[in-house]
Image: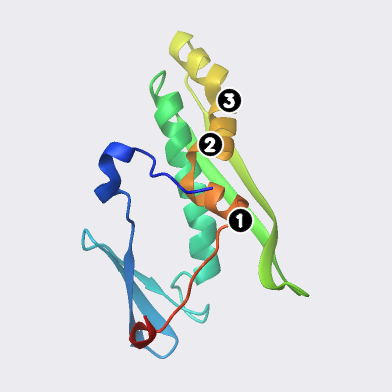
C-alpha cells in the first residue's frame, strides 16, 4: 500500500524535517525549519532525552487534537496530559512498552462546558485512532531508514 499525503493537493507541504547538530559530549540541538531549537541530552542534565521527546510528542500531538475538538465548544479550565511507557530490552532490542496517555481536562459549568465534556472521550479516541500523526506512526509498522550522507 502506498502512503498518501494527508492532503494530496498539498504534497509539497507534506515533508517534515528536523536538523540535529552536536553541541557537546552526548548533547545535541534539534532545529526545525521555523528556527525553533530544542536541546537533547542523554539524561545527565535537564535536557530532554530522545525517549522523553517521543513521549512528549505523543502527548503533545494528541493534546492539540483534543484541544481543537473540545475548544470549539468551550475553553478548558484545566488541561493536563500525563504520558508514560516502560523502557525494556528484550529479543526485539530496546523499546518502550505499555505506552499510556492520561488526560485530566476540566471545563466550566454550563452549556458550553457540558458540550465540551460530551465530546471529550470521542475526541481522545479520534486522535488515537486516526488524527494524531505521532501516535499513529508509532502504532503502524513504519520502517525507519538510517544511512550515511556519503552512502546515499
Q: Position of residue 72 (x, y in %)?
A: 38, 21
Q: In terms of sequence position, does the residue under pointer 3 or pointer 2 come before the other?
A: 3
Q: Secondary structure at mark 3?
A: helix
Q: Residue furthest top?
A: 111
Q: Residue at x 54, y 57 (%)?
A: 55
Read off the residue under disc 3.
Answer: 122
| Nearer to us: label 2 or label 1 | 1
Q: Secondary structure at mark 1?
A: loop
Q: In terms of sequence position, does the residue under pointer 3 or pointer 1 come before the other?
A: 3
Label 2 and label 1: CA atoms lie apart by 15 Å
Mark 2 closeness class: few <14, some 14–19, many ≥20 residues within 10 Å: few
Q: Secondary structure at mark 2?
A: helix
Q: Position of residue 3 (x, y in %)?
A: 46, 48
Q: Position of residue 100 (x, y in %)?
A: 66, 49
- Reply above or below: 27 against 4: below
| Nearer to us: label 3 or label 2 | 2
Q: Residue furthest front?
A: 1
Amino acid at each position: 500500500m502506498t502512503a498518501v499525503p494527508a492532503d494530496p493537493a498539498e504534497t509539497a507541504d507534506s515533508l517534515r524535517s528536523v536538523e540535529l547538530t552536536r553541541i557537546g559530549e552526548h548533547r545535541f540541538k534539534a532545529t526545525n525549519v521555523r528556527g525553533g531549537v530544542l536541546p537533547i541530552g542523554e539524561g545527565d542534565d535537564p535536557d530532554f532525552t530522545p525517549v522523553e521527546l517521543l513521549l512528549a510528542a505523543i502527548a503533545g500531538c494528541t493534546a492539540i487534537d483534543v484541544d481543537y475538538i473540545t475548544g470549539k465548544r468551550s475553553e478548558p479550565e484545566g488541561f493536563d496530559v500525563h504520558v508514560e511507557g516502560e523502557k525494556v530490552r528484550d529479543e526485539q532490542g530496546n523499546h518502550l512498552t505499555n505506552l499510556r496517555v492520561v488526560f485530566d481536562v476540566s471545563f466550566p459549568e454550563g452549556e458550553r462546558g457540558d458540550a465540551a465534556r460530551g465530546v471529550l472521550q470521542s475526541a481522545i479516541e479520534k486522535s488515537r485512532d486516526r488524527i494524531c500523526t505521532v501516535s499513529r506512526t508509532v502504532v503502524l509498522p513504519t520502517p525507519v531508514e538510517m544511512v550515511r550522507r556519503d552512502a546515499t
